[in-house]
Image: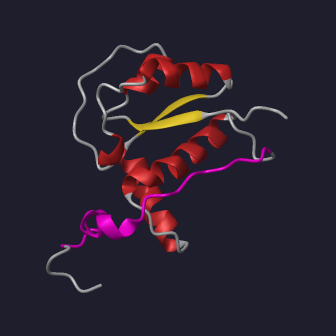
């Protein structure tokens, strides 16, 4: 069987794997709404880069805005995930738009991080004060 392409999605604010894969200069990490992937020095960097290369996949950096939009878009469709998890949906849209992933290809997005633990942050994305607003 054919090996699937593996893509790494990281917030632009903290994207050491994506920057290394794309041969971009390293920059200092800054806070991100996708704190679950804010790892400035990944301990398995060589292995991750090898998996991306071997699978003919790649890496993509997602802006804070793209992460927020994907989080709210998924919630509107009934999938309540944390911003870290929503990166895969934002990355998928970006990869399809660039032609890196074709609409005809079978694609799997892993969405495992529940939005329940991030409700205050998601409320902020919606422009609500999570401690005084009624939902």
**Residue at image location 30% in from the left, 69% down from the top:** 119
- On the image, the x and y values in percent for residue 100 come to 67, 33
Q: How is the image coloured?
A: secondary structure
Quadrant the C terminus occupies: bottom left
Asked if the magenta segment contains residue 109, the reply would be: yes
* Image: magenta residue range: 105-129
- On the image, the x and y values in percent for residue 71 come to 43, 60
Say above or below: 29 vs 73. Answer: above
Residue 23 visible from this viewpoint: yes
The residue at the far bottom in this view is 134
- On the image, the x and y values in percent for residue 14 come to 32, 33
**Residue at image location 53% in from the left, 74% down from the top:** 78
Asked if the magenta segment contains residue 107, the reply would be: yes
The image quarter containing residue 37 is top left
Say above or below: 108 vs 15. Answer: below
* Depth order, front residue of 43/85: 43
The image quarter containing residue 127 is bottom left
- On the image, the x and y values in percent for residue 108 come to 66, 50
* Depth order, front residue of 46/63: 46
Residue 126 visible from this viewpoint: no
* Depth order, front residue of 97/80: 80
Tally of numbered discs: 0
**Residue at image location 25% in from the left, 30% down from the top:** 29
**Residue at image location 75% in from the left, 47% down from the top:** 103
Quadrant the N terminus occupies: top right
Say above or below: 40 vs 129. Answer: above
The residue at the far left in this view is 132
Q: Is residue 32 left or right of residue 108?
A: left
Say above or below: 36 vs 118. Answer: above
């Amino acid at each position: 069987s054919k090996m699937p392409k593996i893509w790494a999605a990281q917030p632009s604010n903290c994207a050491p794997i994506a920057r290394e894969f794309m041969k971009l200069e390293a920059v200092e990490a800054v806070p991100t709404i996708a704190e679950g992937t804010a790892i400035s020095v990944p301990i398995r960097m060589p292995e991750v880069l090898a998996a991306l290369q071997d699978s003919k996949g790649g890496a993509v950096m997602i802006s804070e805005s793209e992460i927020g939009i994907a989080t709210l878009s998924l919630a509107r469709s009934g999938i309540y995930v944390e911003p870290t998890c929503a990166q895969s949906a934002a990355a998928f849209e970006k990869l399809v738009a660039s032609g890196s992933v074709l609409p005809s290809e079978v694609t799997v997005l892993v969405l495992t991080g529940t939005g329940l633990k991030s409700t205050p942050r998601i409320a902020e994305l919606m422009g609500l004060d999570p401690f005084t607003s009624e939902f």
